[in-house]
Image: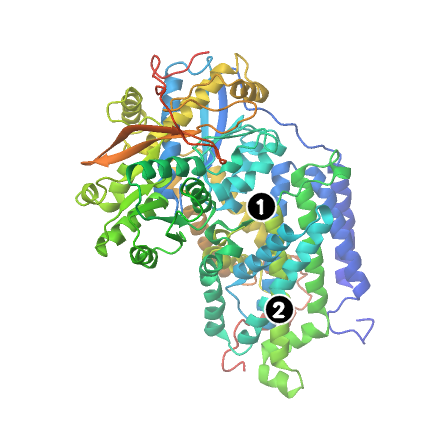
Amino acid sequence: MSRPQRLPGQRPLARTLLLAAGWTLVALLGTFALDPFRNYQLALVAAYLCATAGLTVLVGASGQLSLGHAALMAVGGYGYALTSNALPFGGVARFVVALLAGALVSAVVGLLLGLAAARLSGPYLAGLTLAVVVALPAVASTWSTVLHGDQGVQTAFEGVPDALRRVIALEQWQAMVAVVVAAVVVTGLTVLRGGRFGLRMQAVRDDEVAARLSGIPAGRVKVLAFTASSVAAGLGGAVLCFVAQAVSPGAYTVGFSLLLVVAVVIGGLGSILGAALGSAVVVLLPWLIGRLTAGLPTDAAQRLDGNLAVLVFGLLLITVMALAPQGLHGALTARRRPIDEPVRTEEHTKVLVPTEEQR
Amino acid sequence: MSQRSRSIPALVATALVAAGLSACSTPEASPGVTDDTITIGTHTPLTGPAAAGYSSISAATKAYFDYVNDNGGINGRSIEYVVKDDGYNPATTQTVVRELVQEEEVFAVLNGLGTPTHSSVVDYLNENEVPDLFVASGSPQWDQPEKYPWTFAYNASYIVEAKALATYAQETWPDKTYCVLGQDDDFGTDFTTGLLTVLGGDGLASTQTYSVSVQDVVAQIGAMQAAGCEVNFLATVNGFTALALGTAAKMKYRAQWVSSSSGGDYPTLVGYLGEDVAPLLLQGFVSSNYLPFSPDDEWVTLFQQINDEYNGGAQFSGNTVFGMSVGYLFAQALAQAGEDPTRESVLDALEVGTLTGNGIVPLSFSKDSHAAFEGVGITVVDKGVQDYVGEVFTTDAGSGDVVPFTGEPVALEGDGIPTA
């Protein structure tokens, strides 16, 4: 390391931002090469990436497991939809204000959840977060005058701005917006994790008692990590609402919430690239399966519809865990790393829930 | 150092590839018509909570198209019907409708099912000028030719139904206490709006709502019993109609039930309540309908034959008639659209207003109206048979009067395959 004052493994901020801007530009240019449906899928991947990136940082770096990120996405979606419907003006300004409102609402809910979560660990924390997702439909129907129950909240159609109408299609515009939001989320999380706060999260994850003895306010670190992750998920939900023009409890089920965790684990816990791979798998796999079963007779295809994808996700999870415990990203870097370079031990000591010996 | 040496060249290389690819433009849309086929698609729940009530509709439409195709198709083209499952989830509807339009390149979307689900794609379809025909939902929002020129409704609007049922109730049971149990979404709200238009602002003694995700209506039925309700209107889906009647029976609460057509399909209700008690619980049950449903109707006879031959003899219900009637209307529009149909020519065929469909009231399609049925007939269950009682009303979705209709239902012509 040429500059010892930097934390281990830390990049200079300017370089991180430059890289982020570069990759975002590449992704934006890439949307021109995709047909509308591919662009729509890209928008979905970007929206899911916001949530999975937040989740992977939460689980991988701070060691808190959340099974309820779908509910946090829904919170962001409802925040976006209700604000968007309440605003008197339209266009890009409405989108930005509504997006920020979605982020704010998910921050508040994430903070409250985080306060409870910081006192819990392991299965108790998982149970708490799971309960939030399970409660979502009941919350939506209890306050149905505002949240409109199972039907959910619909938002006005947000088309391509007039200036760009001739150049780009609707799906491409949605993909571009989603990519920019995802880029901001991912960059924010990278900076957060790469700096002092990231080091504190890791200290708390690896040994909470030792972290406290070193003067790290463990509780506050956990709450902040949960809040940051919640904002990321909320922004993902808001983007999804922007694309789908609707947010409803039916879109954020327990199954979907677990799928987010599966995406993070398949991609590689703690890795943001892994989160991106995981969200691509979550979007593309059901579609690919649909393509494959399209040739089957109607009643067989109908029986497999929706069920086969769950089965394949389960098999994929088991296979990845058996062959590449570090996930897809781990498998990629392991192959790329030269044999003589020593394996960074840090990656191997990452644990979800520390055992007694590790404590 | 290794980070820097890897990521910068990777970035540059990817940027170059992307720049090269960006020269390609977006592909142009194809209308899904070949010399001997025409491909259309739909989104409908085949899995999930709403599937039980509605999955038989698309199967019936497909069976009707198979029947048409076996008899030479329309203008020599066979109709390919692509059915996509959306699980009644608007986010999934978005995905599958894009698949239909962009991957399957369908000519039109036919009979997309559900208010929340279809709301999420109606802008997309109109933006892309894809005919969005005969939406399977009674929401009045599909009838907005100015805002949604490519969207045409199919169901009679919930408001029209409610106004007709309220008028029938006032004539049949004057001075009784009226109440309503409605789903807590647009369905329940619109239906209640229609009831109040006829009954007056204080016409309902109790207004109860339920949520589909909560499978219990004891509190609501109890409140209606306590309020002394004698004639109960239902804006419920079939499952909850059965639940409401069953719950009331358990509570020994007798009332006259008057249901919207969406939750008043006798064969489906028998499926929920059981063969033994259904005829007793449903005796005198009033509902509305706008499609042929009398047991001796010639349309029903034809549809039963098609159902036996092309649908594997599946249970014959109101959904079967609904699905096949939608298929018939599309075939009629296609036949009118000429030898070489385009998306515009189908639109014109609908807006000219000469299509008849097969309902008991004439279709209302015109340049200014994209509503299909602006009237319904009253049906009553008697000794296990649901049939029209002769009363048919027409009205609009606004504050217009409810007028008795004296015309004849559309008669079956030939073998039920439209010709130009």
- Which residue position is annotated with label 1? A244
Residue at image position (45%, 63%) is: A135
Label disc, if present, on residue A227 of the rendered structure: 2
- Tell me residue A77's x, y (percent): 58, 55
- Tell me residue B387's x, y (percent): 26, 30
Chain bearing mark 1 = A
Most extreme residue toward the front, as rendered?
Answer: B175
Occupied quadrant, residue A175: top right
Q: Secondary structure at mark 1?
A: helix
B101 over B203 or under it: above or below? above
Give the mark nearest the N terminus, 2 or 1.
2
Q: Is residue A354 left or right of residue A346?
A: left
Which amino acid lies under the numbered mark 1 shown in the image of this protein? Answer: Ala
Q: Secondary structure at mark 2?
A: helix
Q: Is residue A49 visible?
A: no
Q: Is residue B30 visible?
A: yes
Q: Is residue A117 left or right of residue B60?
A: right
Which amino acid lies under the numbered mark 2 shown in the image of this protein? Answer: Thr
